Amino acid sequence: MTEATLETARALMGDTLAFHILFALLGVGLPFLMSVFEGLGLWYKDEDYRRTARTMGFAVTALFVTGAVSGTIVSFQINLLWPYFMQFANPIIGLPFVLEGFAFLVEAVFLGIYLYSWDKLSPFAHWLCSFPLWIGSFASAFLITTVNGWMNNPQGFTLAPDGTVSNIQPWVAMFNPTAFYEITHSLLAYYLTATFLVAAVFAWRLLRIKKTGGNEGYYQKMLTLLLSLALFFATAVGIAGDNSGKHIAQTQPIKFAAAESVYKTGGYQPLVWAGYVVPVRSETEDPDIRYELSFPNALSWLAFDNPSAVVQGLDAFPRSEWPPLYIHYFLNIMITIGIYLGLVPLVFFLLRHSPWRAYAFNRPLLWAIVAGAPLAFLAVEMGWMLTEIGRQPYIIKGIMRTSEAVTTNTDMLIFAWIFPFAYLVLFAFTWWILRYHYIVKART
Amino acid sequence: MTEILLPYLPILAYTLVLLFITLYAVLSSIEFGAAIYLALPRPLITREQVEQYFGPVWESTNVFLIFSLVGLVMFFPAVVPYLAELYALASIALLFFVVRVLGIFGIFYGDSKHPAFKALFAIGSLGAPLALSGAFYVSLTGTAPAVLPTTLLLAIWGAVVSAICILSATFILHVARSQVDTARFARTQLVGSGVFLLCAAHILAFSPALIQPGIVPLLAFTVILLSTSLAIVLRERTHPLAAFLAHALAVAALIYGTALSHLPYLIYPVLSIETAFTAPEMFLAMLSVVPFGLLIAIPTIGLLWHLYARSSILRQ
C-alpha cells in the first residue's frame, strides 16, 4: 500500500459518499414531507396540500433513480476500496446491511405503488401507502447510521491480542449507544434540509410572482407550513447536536478535542469559535489557533454541564492518534449554518405574529430562505466530514487504522477522476430534468 | 441444534446468495432488454410502451444487485479482498449504470427524442450486465478476464445477452401483447433460446482441474433444455407469462448448476465456501431477519403487481 493508494481510496470514497448523501437525505426527507402534505390535505379537505404532495412525486422519483445508482456505487466502493475493513467488520456488524436491503426494497416498491395509485386507491388508502415509503427510507438511513456508530464506538465482540474475534453479538454491535446519537442528529438534519429545499422552491416562486404577478396565496400557505416544520426540525437538530456533542466528549475525546481546538487538558475550558488553525508542520511543533473568539468556561459547561469540568486536550493523546486539526472548521461551519437555519423561520414567525405581519414575506427574508437550502446541504456534508475525518487515522476507532483497511489494487488510480466526473454529469442531468419538469414543461 | 446445522450453514448461505443473483438476473433482464429493443434501427417497442410498462421507478431492480453483493460479502467475508482485485471490472459496470441513467433521464424524464439517449440507455443496459458477468468468470476460473476473451467468457456473455433478450421478450409479450409485433418477438425468443442453450452447454461443460463435477451439470442442462422448450411452446400457445417463468427457471438452473458443480470453491482454486464463511452467530442473526424481511417484501411486491397488472389491463 502506497500513500497515493490510500489518498486515492479516501478521495474516491469521499467523493462517492458526498455525492450520495445529497440524494439519500432527500430520499429520506421528501417522502416524509409528501406524507405530511397529503395528510393535511385529507385532514383539512384542502386540495392545495394534496396538489403539492402530488407535484413533489416527480422530484422524489427522479432523485430516487439517482440515489439508487449512487447507492449501488457506494455499496461496491466500500467493499472494493476497503476490503480488509469489510472482511473484519462484516461478521460483527453485517446485520444492518442485510436489513437495509429490505428497507430499500420496501421503499422502492412503495414508491412505485404510491406513484401508480393516485387515481386508483381511495385518498385515505393512498395516504396510508406513503407511510411504508417514508418509514422505509427512514429505516435505511437508521440502519446504515448504526454501522457508522459502530465504527466510532465498536462493541459486540471480543478481540484477542492476536487479532482473532470471538463472542460476537450482532444485535449488541448494531444497537451501540453512539448510533442513537448519530441517528437522531443526522436524520433530523435530513428532514430539516429537505424542508428547507422545498421551502426554498416556494420562496423562489414567490419572489418570481412578486416580479411577474400571480396568485401568492397558495405559495404563502405552503411556505408557512414548511417554515413551521423547519423551526421544529432546527430546534430538534440543535438539541440532538448538543446531546451528540456531549456523547462525543465522553466516548471520542480525541475527535472532540480536535474539533473544539482543545490543545491542553484542563478545567474551565473556553469555547473556541472560528479562528485560524495553524497547520502543524513538524512532530515537535505545538498546535495553535489564532484570531478565534473565546467564551470562557463555556466548553466545559456545554460538554459536561459543569463549568469547571476537565476536558481532555490533544496533549493527553499520542500525536500519531490525532485527527487532522482542520475538522474545527467543519464543526464551526455546521453549527453556524444550523443557527442560521433556526433563525430564519424564527424571524418569519416573529414577524408574522407582530404588528409588522405584512412584512413576513418580504424579499430579503425570502432570499434568506432560498439561501438556506444550499447551506443546509453544506451543513450535512460538514457534519459527515467531521464524523469521518475526525475518526482518522482509524477506520474502526482504536481497532483498525484506515491504512490497514485499504485495498492493494492500484487500478483505482485510473478511476480517481472518472467517478467524480460521472457524478458531475449525473448531477447536471438530475438538475436538468428537474428544471425541465418544473419550469420549462410547467410553462408550456 | 446449532451444532447439528453448523456444517450445512455455508451451503445454505451460498444457496441464498445464488437466489439473490438469480432474482437480479431475471428481473433486471426485463428492463435491460427493453432498452435494447427500443434502440434497434426498427424498434420492437416504443418509448411510450417502455415508460408505461417499465416505469415509473427505474433502477429499483438494483436492490437485488445490492442483495447479491451484500449476501456474498456478509456471508463470505473472506471473499472481499478477492473482489477488490476486480476493481476495474466493477467500476466499468458501475459507470455503465450511470450511462444507463443518463439515457433514462433523457428519454423518459427530459422527453428528448434525440437518438443519443436511446444509445446511452442501450449501451448502459448491455454493458452493465456484461461487465458484472466478468465476476462469474473469475469465480469459475480464478483468473481475471483477458483482453482477448476466452470461449468461456464469450459463452457467459452470450448467455447473458440471450437471457436478457428472451426474458424481456416474453415479459413484453405478457404485458403488451396487443400493442407489439408478436411475430418479431417470437423470432427473437426462438433465436435467443438457441443461443442460450448453446452457451449454457458450454458453460456447464467447463470443468477446471481440481473439480469433479459429477451429475449436477447434466441435471442442470436437462432442466434448461426442458424449460426452454416449454417456454417456446407456452409462448406459441399465447401464455407469455408462463413462458417468461419457464425461461427464468432455465436461467436459475444455469446459475445454480454452474455454481453447485464447482463446489466447494467460491473462487477457484483459492477460496472455498467453508473457509470464506462468516461467523455462525452472524449468519444465524442474518438468517433470522430474512423471514421477517420477506414477510414485508412479498406482500408489498404483490400489491405493486396487483396495481400494475390492473393498470396495464385498463390501459390495454
Image (cartoon, rainbow, N blue to C red):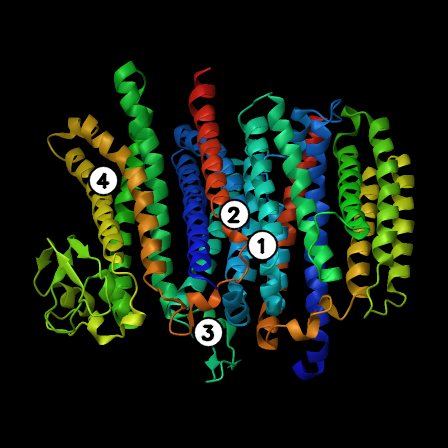
> Given the image, on which type of amino acid does mark 4 rest?
Pro
What label sits on residue A209 in the rendered view?
A: none
Q: Residue furthest left?
A: A296
Which residue carries the number 3 mark? Answer: A172
SS of the residue at dot 3?
Answer: helix
Q: Please state which of the two labelled residues, at mark 3 or mark 1, is closer to the viewer.
A: 1
What label sits on residue B87 in the rendered view?
A: 1
Residue A169 in the image: state x and y as whole percent: 50, 76
Q: Is residue A184 left or right of residue A160?
A: left
Q: Is residue A178 visible?
A: yes
- Quadrant location of residue A395? bottom left
Distance, label 2 to label 1, CA atoms, is: 9 Å
Circles 3 and 2 on the same subunit: yes
Q: Earlier in the sequence, mark 2 or mark 4?
A: 4
Residue B49 in the image: state x and y as whole percent: 68, 27
Distance, label 3 to label 2, CA atoms, is: 37 Å
Residue visible at 43% across and 17% down in the picture: A443
Q: Please state which of the two labelled residues, at mark 4 or mark 1, is closer to the viewer.
A: 1
Distance, label 2 to label 4, CA atoms, is: 43 Å
Could you tell me if the residues under marks 3 and 1 are in contact, i.e. CB atoms within 8 Å? no
Distance, label 3 to label 1, CA atoms, is: 33 Å
Residue B247 in the image: state x and y as whole percent: 82, 46
Please state, as top left, top right, bottom left or bottom right, where the N terminus of chain B lies in the image.
bottom right
Q: Earlier in the sequence, mark 3 or mark 2?
A: 3
Q: Is residue A191 above or below residue B114?
A: below
Could you tell me if the residues under marks 4 and 1 are in contact, i.e. CB atoms within 8 Å? no
What label sits on residue A345 in the rendered view?
A: 4
> Given the image, on which type of amino acid does mark 2 rest?
Phe
Q: Is residue A75 left or right of residue A43?
A: right
Q: Is residue A386 above or below residue B193?
A: below
- Quadrant location of residue B78? bottom right
Chain for numbered disc 3: A
